[in-house]
Image: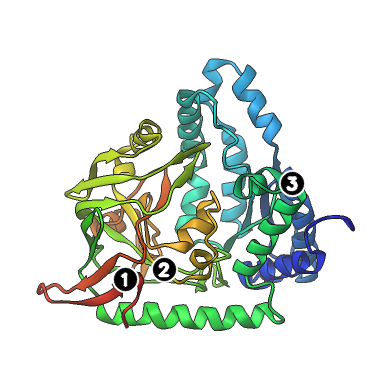
Amino acid sequence: MSNSPIDPVKLDKLGEVAIKVGLQLAEGQDLVITAPMTAAPLVRRITEHAYKAGAGLVTTIYSDEEATLARYRYGNDASFDHSAGWLYSGMAEAYKKNAARLAISGDNPMMLAGQDPDKVSRAMRANSAAYKPAMELITGFDINWNIVSYPTPAWAKLVFPNDSEEEAIAKLADAIFKASRVDQADPIGAWKEHNANLKRRYTWLNEKNFASLKYTGPGTDLTIGLADGHKWKGGASEAKNGVTCNPNIPTEEVFTTPHKLRAEGYVAGTKPLSHNGALIEEMQARFENGRLVEFKSAKNADLFNKVLDTDEGARHLGEVALVPHSSPISASGILFFNTLYDENASCHIAQGQCYADCFVDGKNLSKDEIAARGGNASNIHIDWMIGSDQIDIDGVNADGSSEPVIRKGEWAF
């Protein structure tokens, strides 16, 4: 690795931050890692820091782009309606026994571009259904979990197409390190300060307890009702197993659960969405009674409409998140083709599954109680960006009075 364009010191710091800030891995706790094979250098750093922190057993499940593409080129048609349910059942079993979960993102976002979109959507549907028992333990925040990223060659060349592969990797690595705060002398201290700032934001929102948010801007006039007994969160928070973790590194958002039946109006996407090998651009959506009833985009509208037909909950909202336009990721001016990054450049909403922990006393609520409060259920959770420096957001009270939350993309309080 001595001739790698990736700074080994910062890579090691990212591994340390993933364990000590992202997961805050508990003594004796097992860890399940998922990662592309090309991210092995980061997997090794994380694994070392995990064992130094007293981990039980660290197990990594690798994916390989060429093997994935071989399925689409040569796989039996019927196989696209199947998934490795045994694998996901095993992961769910591990989480039930309190294993922590860490995902390393870095797959080529355009890997499935050019593949049969019907096969892609069928495979995704089968995968989502098989993964649901494990996913529910993650979205329900039963365990401490974390996502970090690694600058793989294919991803780097997509983000920086005019550079050599080595230069592109170096640039993407630097962007990841900066966004993840590992370019600083004391990354762990920097994360403590950042988490405190996010806490101030969500504490104010929780004290206000708005009934809904009103979005206005170019192509946007949307009211999103918030779930009954909703709770804003951001940065570090405590999982049901008692461990405080930072699920997303990086993160710039505060977020909560909208009411699945209370979105009204229309909204324009402000950044492209990279999904399953396709770039969905200039998105426009109209909501009635909480349901996305009309979706259009300049590119790949058919693909996203298929995703919206995954199940009944896919056309309803599961998350609403606020991010200032001046966030470091937005200020970088980089389109990452990666939702973990792109969503932290902009206010966003998510189609599909809600986070059970975004309710007051959410850790103790049953699925039926969450549904009764307006929480949405789905096999998907897909974020898309609706914020910019031209968007205003008001918090609306139950009596109809309102006050500014965001003005021209920046916090108004």
Helix, strand, or loop for circle 1?
A: loop
Q: Which residue is mark 1?
A: 408
Q: Is the Cβ of the residue at disc 2 closer than 8 Å to that at disc 3?
A: no
Q: Which residue is mark 3?
A: 165
Whole-angstrom CA distance, mark 3 to mark 1, is 37 Å
Q: Position of residue 138 (x, y in %)?
A: 51, 56
What's under tag 3, amino acid-wise?
Glu
Q: Earlier in the sequence, mark 3 or mark 1?
A: 3
Helix, strand, or loop for circle 3?
A: helix
Q: Is the Cβ of the residue at disc 1 closer than 8 Å to that at disc 2?
A: yes
Q: Which residue is mark 2?
A: 325
81 over 387 or under it: above or below: above
**Horizontal side of residue 111 vs 411, given as left or right:** right
Query: Quarter-wise, where is residue 355 in the image?
Result: bottom left
Dot 1 crowding, Cα within 10 Å, few <14, some 14–19, many 20+: some
Q: Position of residue 273 (x, y in %)?
A: 44, 46
**Residue drawn 41% across the image and 68% down it:** 323
Residue at the extreme right of the image, as rendered: 2
Dot 2 crowding, Cα within 10 Å, few <14, some 14–19, many 20+: many
Q: Position of residue 344 (x, y in %)?
A: 48, 63
